[in-house]
Amino acid sequence: MKPGHSADIWLALFFLGFALILIFVWIPLDTGTGLVEKVRRKFVIGDALAPTVAAVAIALGAALGLLRPANGRALTRANVIWCACLLGLFTVSLVLMRYAGPLAAAWTESGYRPLRASLPWKYIGFLLGGTVMIGGLTGLTTRRLSLKDFAIGFAATLLIALAYDLPFDDLILPPNGDL
Amino acid sequence: MGIWDHVIAGVLAVFQSDPVLGVPLTILMVLGGFLLGITVGATPGLAGPMAMAISLPILISIFGFSNDALLPVLGFLIGIMKGATVGGAVPAILFNTPGTPDAYMTTLDGYPLAQKGEARKALRVAHFASASGDTFSDIVLVVCAPFLAIMVESYLDLPEKTALLILSLAFIASVIGGSVGKGIISMGLGLLAAMVATGEDFYPRLTMGQPSLSEGIPIAAAILGVLILGEVFKALEDIYLDDRSAKAQTGVNVQESKVEFLELRKLFPYIGRSAVIGTCIGALPGIGSTLAATLGYTTAKRRYAIKKSASDPEFGEGAPEGIAATEAANSSVSGANLIPVLSLGIPGNAAAVFLILAMDSIGGFNPGPSVFRLDGGIGDGALNPEMVMAFGLFTTMFVANGFNWTIGGIFMRVVGVMARIPKARLLPIVLLLTLTAIYVQETSMVAVWITIFCGFLGYIMRRVGMSPLPFVIAFILGGNLEATARQAFAATGADPFFLFNSPIALVFILLAIGVVIYSLRSTAR
Amino acid sequence: MTTFLKATAAAAILSIASVTSALAEGHGWKPEGPIKMMIAFAAGGGADTHARLIAEDLQAATGWEIVPEQVTGKGGVNALVALKEMPADGTAIAMVVTESIGYNAAAAKGAGISPSDFTGLTTTAGFQMGVVAKAEKGWTSFEDMIAAAKEGELRFGTMSPKLSDLAYLLGEAHGVEFNIVQVRGGKAVMNGVQAGDMDLGFMAGIQGKGVASGDLVNLASALSEPLKQTPDAPTFADLGVSFNADGYFVFVAPAGMDPAAREALTAAIVESTNSGKANGMITKAFGGPVNIQGAELDALFQSDFEAAGALMEAAQ
């Protein structure tokens, strides 16, 4: 094994394992019909066949990867940390987007649902979440949180909101379709 | 009803669409898309497919799901696709930064030429070559797609259609990216994702009992996630890890310098060869414009070394031939890659993926062999509406070419400023715009989360050197493959060897195995 | 970009105009907020177009904001499962087919839905379900087709499990076995028959123009009554099959709905199927509106749901 190949070998082993779990555990447990079924006295293809074919393709790809590893890159620690940061930021901003409006409306008599199509309620979650997402992401990327980035974020979010909401009355901004 | 009736009806469908400000709507949409495409192509970090992806939900909201929506929406998307190819050359020449990946080779001669104070000439050559290659490719498309489709429809039964889909997937997985193994894994993952909650039985398979998945993975979420978000995550991390690139590039000024027709004539042989190379590559699903550009450039380099006179600059030192060869090759991919889309329903690259997504979302046009059936219209004297639509689509492509020849060159000189927008500011906005577009279509936060997870998948694939394109194409074709296989199996009276019993199907399957083995050998060397 | 703005401005003006005109009309009941209309059919098909036209007419006539949304898959079961969880205050309705609440709800045991989970509003149109073949096959009657099936296996295209059961029983009654090819949607059956991938198939009205022009033939009616277009074709009962494919497009809401809301929504939908663009489309594609509502509709759901078990058993 040449140096530099190990990342590809690990990748192939990972997908080989994944494919085996698919074929022997997940697919049998999580499909309604088998590989083939007898329906109306004839055999037909069941729901498990196509996923199994997909899993066999993954296993085949992994096997080829084991046989002929290339000089692939592995995920570095820095990559994983980057993903975690992104995931954290998305969680914060999407939770804000989803719940800020209902929270603000918690003190009104009716609650958020009847208000979700009226100003200013319908924009609260989207503006807050969107601003945090754009400002935070720019800040994360440039390693420096700045008020200017959040201001740009707010302006961009407002523009997006208006661009969708003003012209089209049957388009719904997040999160108002979930409520 | 003959084929010419359909051609005429298709052309009329474009030119007689509802006029806005006195201009037919579809033509205005092509123009809008084309200008947007040049702008996006000229912005490093944005690419044509990204703009197509974000525009699509907005366009669908404007035009709705009726048949009348197809041509304006597809016209706009085709405009973007063509504009972006031209626009990609602008920052490559002015700032030494390719606006789109396939314009990398353009920097090699474009930037040196610009440094010599001949930026305008470089842009002019790029535009001329790009427009020529594009037009050539479209002509090939219009001539080939209907015949290929008719042949498929008259010779292929359900088992052969199944085998053809398998062959296409095997080909795409093997030729995209550097590693056959990773390509096949990517394809397998795409097929698997397409299987979630689909299937015939009422139990939603592979959802692990999650009701939020019971409608399956939304097609827009998977495609936009893997292709757009994955790219945004990676590009932002690149800036994070190396913040030098976040700074704006220093550029050269566009000065006046005339290009004589004689000078352009000298480029014809280079443009011609590259256009043929690009068209051939475009017609094969999955290879893409970057390889076409590379091949076009290297072929031209070889010829140039023999033909050039002593006073001409070498390739890499500002030879207009280098720009022409690259731009003609990468632009001639875009028309030809619609050949497999329209005749077989198989997308060959990211731009084609979004065209299929648009057709699929709007409905009423199912790309594939049935499009070009003369008896597709119901009843005597009725035109086949899908064939009319196909010729309408061809018309929009030529309208876009018309805009390219007339105003494309002028507009290119205007958008150079786009390269100065810092990516770290732009990409987060693109991200929110994408997520909002998904939400507007799916109206569920779950779909937004699915998109984000697909984004991480796309990011990881890019980081480990696995091309995301086989994933996306397999995701699109997966449902079709399963349905055709089920039908073929049922139609042959449950014959387990239905893929091997007809000679045509057998040939397709053998070719599929052959292409994997061949690619494996050629990459091992 | 200016075109966008122009179109936008025009759209905005139009919508304001329609709202004001509608407010004048007045109804006893008014929804709280926009009404989500789930459509259980793929975008762009006949069923989807008809639902969207009704939504447009409804919005114009009442001033209620209607938001159509695709919830496709599993023969309407996905839409019904989603609808069941929604509030029963008239802000969520779905358009499915009676088969979704009947056969499909009974077959999808894991989904846990039954007619009692829903409030039926009204049907909009019925299917003209025929057994159809291409004229160039040379069959002029049902018997011709059976004779051909005895010569060699025929491929029978269907678009739902219930129709597959019916195709099987039809073959059984005449001593032939069809190769039943189940596809998604009536359009796919039509394409399959046209392209020669299938020899015959069920079509629910889409065959109208082709039959009229002589390209297609209605060999039999899969309904309890003769087809409007081909009254001479035998019905399934004539052909010895005791089940039929009677079915309708239908609007439903979650169970436990306020009767006033049910009445207002039903009346508004009925009105829109009988006037305007929706009526034109329904008349052209499905032979005119059919409005079964109230107790009669409840009974229809229940009997379809109960009959499903017998059909499934018969087709074992």
Image (cartoon, grey):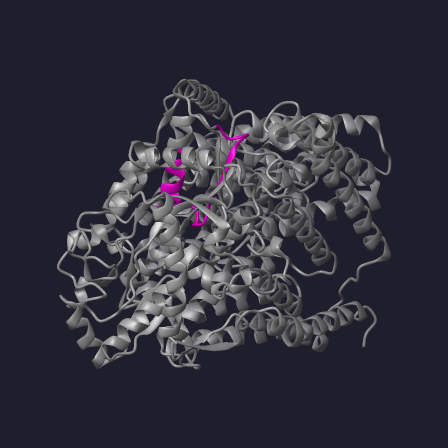
Residue B402 rendering spot, x and y as whole percentages:
42, 35
- Residue B343 sits in which quadrant? bottom left
**Would residue B380 appear left or right of C190 to someone viewing this image?**
left
Where B380 sits versus C216, above or below? above
**Which of B175 and B390 lies nearest the eye of the viewer?**
B390
Q: Position of residue B421 (x, y in %)?
A: 71, 31
Q: Is residue C51 magenta?
A: yes
Q: Name which residue lies at 37% across and 69% down.
A: C310
Residue B436 appears in which quarter of the rendering?
top right
Residue A91 in sight:
yes
Locate residue B96: give its quadrant. top right
The total of numbered circles placed on residues is 0
Q: Which residues are magenta?
A: C30-56
Which of the pair B274/A169 is nearer the observer? A169
Q: Position of residue B431 (x, y in %)?
A: 68, 40
Where, quadrant-wise, is the C terminus of chain B in this rendering? bottom right
Asked if residue B294 shows in the view, the reply is: no
Question: Which residue is more in the foreground, A60 or C242?
Answer: C242
Left or right side of C178 for C109: right
Q: Position of residue A95 (x, y in %)?
A: 74, 40
Up-down relation of residue B275 to residue A56 (above or below) = above
Residue positioned 58% across, 49% down in the render: B308
Left or right placement of residue C43 versus residue B217 in this view? left
The answer to whether residue B5 is above or below residue A113 is below
Q: Is residue C205 magenta?
A: no
